[in-house]
């Protein structure tokens, strides 16, 4: 099966500091994959490179076989924190913007997702809590018909009950062949939906394993992840 994401020999520096080095990562279609790592490990940076928001990296990145930046952007759904929008912006104005920018944005699908999130299109960003904004980001991200979905710490402000509901539903919001990469510091809550875990440590991909392989050794995904940091607390 052709890879959906292919990263070869990727490295990235910012202000002469190495942020990522020797990154090689292949993901196949139809997978839900966690991207794990400590604060500052480079999870957000890697996502920004994949979807062409961060440039001036070295190496090759392909999404669904496409390496050109514009094509990668088209095939990847990543919503970057709504930073460009002012507080008075209404959800429906953001929707209009997404419709213009992304050919694959499905307005009806978005309405269903927004209803699921218990939000409405007349809300202004300034009236929304952190968790509500995160729910909006998830709805905007999955309203696109992309091959690859990137979710950057999507649940940090969302309350436990809603989080559970969203996690249980995510699999239904994508095509069978699409792949999702979710970054987080913790793995326990999302472990049940994961097919694979990728761990960034020491500027590079420290481990990439299927959850099946981890559990075959009678180890939970959480125990496996925590085990990689044991003895480093001091
Ligand atoms: N705008 C920036 N200018 C300079 N350095 C940056 C910038 N943004 C991030 N970095 C550096 O890049 C490294 C990776 O940051 P990144 O945000 O990708 O990590 P992360 O794994 O997503 O972290 P977190 O879990 O805290 O969100 C960090 O060491 C950080 O200091």
Image (tube, rainbow, N blue to C red):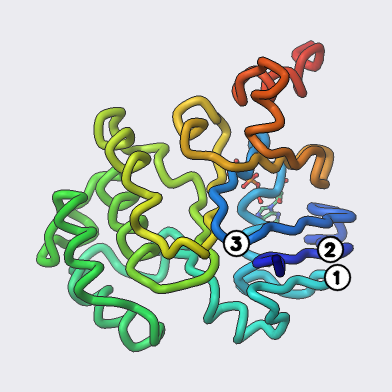
Tell me the element at label 1: strand
Mark 3 → mark 2, Cα distance in angstroms:
21 Å
In the rendered view, does 15 fall on the left or right side of 80?
A: right
Q: Gap between marks 3 and 1, in whole Å?
A: 25 Å
Q: Residues within 10 Å of mark 3 (few under 14, many from 20)?
A: some
Tell me where residue 100 sits by quadrant.
Answer: bottom left
Image quadrant holding the C terminus, namely top right
Q: Nearer the viewer, residue 28 or 14?
A: 28
Query: At numbered mark 3, what does the secondary structure look like: helix, strand or loop?
Result: loop
Tell which tag, 3 or 1, sits nearer the viewer.
3
Q: Is residue 143 above or below residue 102?
A: above
Marker disc for residue 36: none
Residue underneath mark 3: 29
Q: Nearer the viewer, residue 216 or 171?
A: 216
Q: Could you say which disc has been placed on residue 10 in the image?
A: 2
Q: Are marks 1 and 2 in contact (CB under 8 Å)?
A: yes
Of pointers 3 and 2, the one earlier in the residue sequence: 2
Disc 2 on helix, strand or loop?
A: strand
The residue that disc 1 covers is: 58
Q: Mark 3 and ligand 1: say if the CB distance to the nearest ligand atom is below 8 Å.
A: no
- x and y, in percent, of residue 173 in the image: 35, 58
Q: Is residue 151 above or below residue 103?
A: above
Q: Earlier in the sequence, mark 1 or mark 2?
A: 2
Q: Quadrant of residue 45?
A: bottom right
Q: Residue at x 61, y 25 (%)?
A: 221
- x, y percentage for residue 223? 65, 17
Q: Are marks 3 and 1 in contact (CB under 8 Å)?
A: no
**x, y percent for residue 49:** 68, 66
């Amino acid at each position: 099966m052709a890879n959906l994401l292919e990263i070869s020999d990727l490295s990235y520096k910012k202000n002469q500091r190495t942020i990522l080095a020797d990154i090689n990562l292949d993901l196949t279609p139809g997978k839900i994959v966690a991207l794990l790592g400590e604060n500052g490990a480079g999870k957000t940076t890697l996502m920004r490179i994949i979807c062409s928001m961060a440039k001036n990296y070295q190496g090759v990145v392909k999404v669904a076989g496409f390496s050109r930046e514009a094509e990668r952007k088209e095939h990847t759904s990543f919503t970057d924190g709504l930073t460009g929008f002012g507080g008075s912006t209404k959800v429906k104005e953001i929707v209009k913007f997404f419709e213009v920018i992304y050919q694959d944005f499905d307005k009806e699908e978005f309405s269903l997702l927004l209803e699921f999130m218990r939000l409405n299109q007349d809300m202004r960003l300034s009236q929304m809590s952190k968790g509500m904004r995160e729910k909006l980001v998830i709805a905007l991200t999955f309203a696109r018909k992309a091959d690859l979905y990137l979710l950057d710490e999507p649940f940090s402000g969302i309350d436990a009950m809603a989080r559970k509901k969203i996690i249980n539903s995510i699999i239904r919001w994508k095509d069978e062949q699409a792949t999702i990469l979710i970054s987080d510091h913790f793995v326990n809550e999302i472990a049940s939906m994961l097919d694979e875990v990728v761990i960034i440590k020491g500027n590079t991909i420290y481990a990439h394993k299927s959850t099946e392989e981890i559990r075959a050794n009678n180890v939970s995904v959480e125990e496996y992840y925590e085990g990689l940091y044991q003895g480093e607390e001091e």
